[in-house]
Amino acid sequence: MLKADRIARILDHIAKEGSADVHALTALLDVSGATIRRDLQTLHEQGLLHRTRGGAVTGPVNLELPLRHRASRQQEEKRRIAQAAAQLVPDGAVVGMTGGTTVTEIARVLSERSGLTIVTNAVNIAADLIVRSDIRLVVIGGNARTASYELVGPAAERMLSQYHLDIAFIGVDGLTAGEGCTTHDEMEAHTDRAFLRSSARSVVVADTTKIGRVTFAEICPLADIDDLVTDDTLGPEQEKAITERGVRVIRA
């Protein structure tokens, strides 16, 4: 197993469980205890978890994994969500796109189309699309967030206020019927709201690991979005609570 894949699985496991010991991770990944201890120390130095005697801990609500580590999680679900979300985009539309792994998958689907205008604050999405001559690309500037590859802040919000978007795809870190859409970073939440204000139609894309979860900063109540595109494992009670807030749920 490549080190990058091993690191991603360690982070995923500890984010879900809240903690793990070296013995459990050794069994999970089929590697030596020395390898696991080196990986945990690396992640500790990067501020992604806290080393303890014999293992590591983290807060599952507050942990924000860097984009490079999140990309491999729920990949098949994210691809299905992206295909369904892309079908909502009419020909010639102006499309707003925040950052995040699911929105990045939508960008890859839309890159095969022509005549669209993509407005994004995600530098990884911009890097993928800049070579597509059939797509008009507008990059929103601002302060760079290393965890999400997004440009956020007052400069981004001022720039977005000058544009009119036909549809905006918003990535979130958490979504509940009561708390609405949330993310880890307050400044990112403000910029996400600017996308919502500029858009005629607002679509949140999130796999079901995000549903029922609340993170630090509120983006918006569910009443502010039109559609949620998620995967087909969403529970009926969760779906009912979301649709009662006026949101159309699309399963992929």
Image (spheres, rainbow, N blue to C red):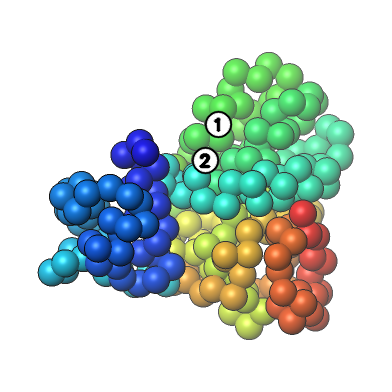
**Position above or below: 153 against 189:** above
Label 1: element kind: helix
**Residue located at (68% from left, 16% from top):** 133
Residue 208 rendering spot, x and y as whole percentages: 63, 64
Report if residue 161 is visible in the image.
Answer: no
Q: Which mark is residue 46?
A: none
Q: Amino acid at mark 2?
A: Ala
User: How many numbered marks does the figure carry?
Assistant: 2
Residue 47 rendering spot, x and y as whole percentages: 24, 57
Q: Nearer the viewer, residue 120 or 181?
A: 181
Residue identifier under label 2 = 122
Residue 4 rendering spot, x and y as whole percentages: 35, 40
Residue most extreme to the right: 91
**Position above or below: 243 against 50:** below
Q: Amino acid at mark 1?
A: Ala
**Residue located at (59% from left, 79% from top):** 179
Q: Indicate left or right for 106 with 26 as reference.
A: right
**Position above or below: 138 against 69:** above
**Residue located at (83% from left, 43% from top):** 87
- How many neighbours does mark 2 have within 10 angstroms: few (below 14), some (14-19), or many (20 or more)? many
Report if residue 213 is visible in the image.
Answer: yes
Q: Which mark is residue 126?
A: 1
Label 2: element kind: loop
Q: Indicate left or right for 61 with 209 as reference.
A: left
User: Do callouts 1 and 2 mark residues in contact (Cβ within 8 Å)?
Assistant: yes
Residue most extreme to the left: 53
Q: Nearer the viewer, residue 189 or 2?
A: 2
Q: Nearer the viewer, residue 73 or 239?
A: 73
